[in-house]
Image (cartoon, rainbow, N blue to C red):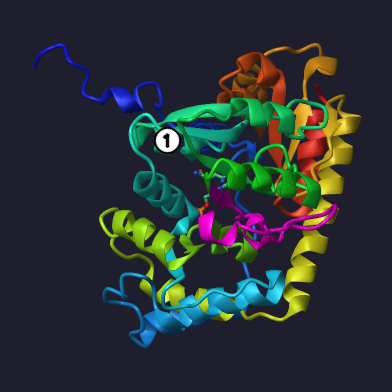
Amino acid sequence: MDARPLLNRRLEGLGTTIFAEMSALATATGSINLGQGFPDTDGPREIAEAAARAVLDGHGNQYPPGPGIPELRTAVAEHQQRFHGLAYDPDTEVLVTAGATEAIAAALLALLEPGDEVIAFEPFYDSYAACIAMAGAVRVPLTLRAPSFRPDLDELRALITPRTRLLLINTPHNPTGTVLTPEELAAIAALAVEHDLLVVADEVYEHLVYTGAHHPIAALPGMRERTVSISSAGKTFSFTGWKVGWVTASPDLVAAVRTAKQYLTYVSAGPFQYAVAEALRLPDAYFDTLRADLLRKRDLLADGLAAAGFRVFNPEGTYFVTTDITPLGEKDGLEFCRSLPARCGVVAIPNVVFYDDTEAGRSLVRFAFCKRDDVLAEAAARLQRL
Ligand code: PMP
Ligand code: GLN
């Protein structure tokens, strides 16, 4: 073989995801895994039973329709209406995907030309950088800086160039927990309209908001026709392994995203689609309890981290609390996370891997609180050893 690297240049440096690395480290060391964001308690029993029933009754065991089963597309449209007052046609404006991950990939591959610029908040969720790279596009970070992690909207305006094609926003934001306010969203929307930009909005944590409320940018004037909204069942129903996600957008945007999606997976998760259709129709009490439980867990972990000496940035939403390790006499989050299992049997995620501006993230470390209360208490006790 010649000396040419096997991995193509676009994917150079992307390596193994930090989530895979840190979950493997947790398994190898028997540590408490507060790294990768997945709950250690499964979602509602009746929804798991609906999935089992679908398999046994032969619903979805063969290829489901390309855009997703009609029951789920209808349930997604009803959910957008019920929670956000957004009307989407289940036949032309909803697309079911293999998790939000595939929706992000399909949207970016469908909508970008090589050389297009994509402005996204950094720290970026890891698949954004990879998918922008696979599309041959250029990522342009708008850095969310500690301690507030709010977007600087003047800076956003200054980042827009004639090559800017798309704004990739994520609210509630992983890993900082920032939830964009109506004012911030209105300012972003106004820039999108003024510069005729597309918006991809990753809203997978839409139900996990503890301060303020989640507002979809698609609801703002001029935005419906230019926004691809993305969500998924993983976080909302505590079944992250099912990988059922969806896109809602105008028929033209859905058709574009579907074109890419059909050559990525074609379809996925047939029986789970039936179960998620039921899940989306759960009563309000389900969503309220989920949020209240996670809020309690957030506070439990945040208090434990503060008591252990971390500087804690209280998240407004998501599964995650970001901390600064500087008060512990530490500087380098990556080194800290690699040594943490040996030092106290806990795994966390170094936020620095989500930054281009590594100085802005060097000392920041993310902990997931979507775990049983006793696990969080034990983790907090172990971290006191620091
Ligand atoms: N976007 C964000 C911001 C995430 O944190 C995650 C991880 N759950 C995803 C997308 C991927 O979601 P899914 O598991 O549905 O593919
Ligand atoms: N979204 C999850 C997190 O941020 C990870 C999902 C993954 O491993 N790709 O922890």
Asked whether residue 212 is drawn in magenta, I would say: yes
Q: Main secondary structure of the magenta part?
A: loop
Residue at figure coordinates x 66%, y 24% from the top left:
340
Q: Quadrant of residue 271?
A: bottom left
Q: Residue at x 48, y 63 (%)?
A: 246
The image quadrant of residue 360 is top right
The amino acid type found where label 1 is placed reads Ile
Q: Which image quarter holds the N terminus?
A: top left
Residue 234 image position (x, y, % from top left): 56, 59
Q: On the rendering, which quadrant does ligand 2 occupy? A: top right
Can residue 48 be seen in this snapshot?
Answer: no
Q: Residue at x 82, y 32 (%)?
A: 148
For this rendering, which residue is in front, 61 or 176? 176
The correct choice, above or below, for 191 with respect to 374 in the image is: above
Q: Quadrant of the C terminus?
A: top right
Q: Position of residue 13 (x, y in %)?
A: 39, 21
Instruction: Count how many numbered circles sit on residues in the image.
Output: 1
Task: Please check the rendered image and state whether residue 213 is part of the magenta-colored stretch, yes or no.
Answer: yes
Q: Position of residue 208 (x, y in %)?
A: 73, 57
Name the residue tied to disc 1.
132
**Cβ(mark 1) to ligand 1 < 8 Å?**
no
Taking the image as shown, residue 324 lies to the left or right of residue 60, namely: right
What kind of element bears circle 1?
Answer: helix
Judged left or right of residue 51, residue 305 is: right
Task: Reply above or below: 88 against 223.
Answer: below
Residue range corresponding to the magenta coloring? 199-228
Residue 210 or 289: which is nearer the viewer?
210
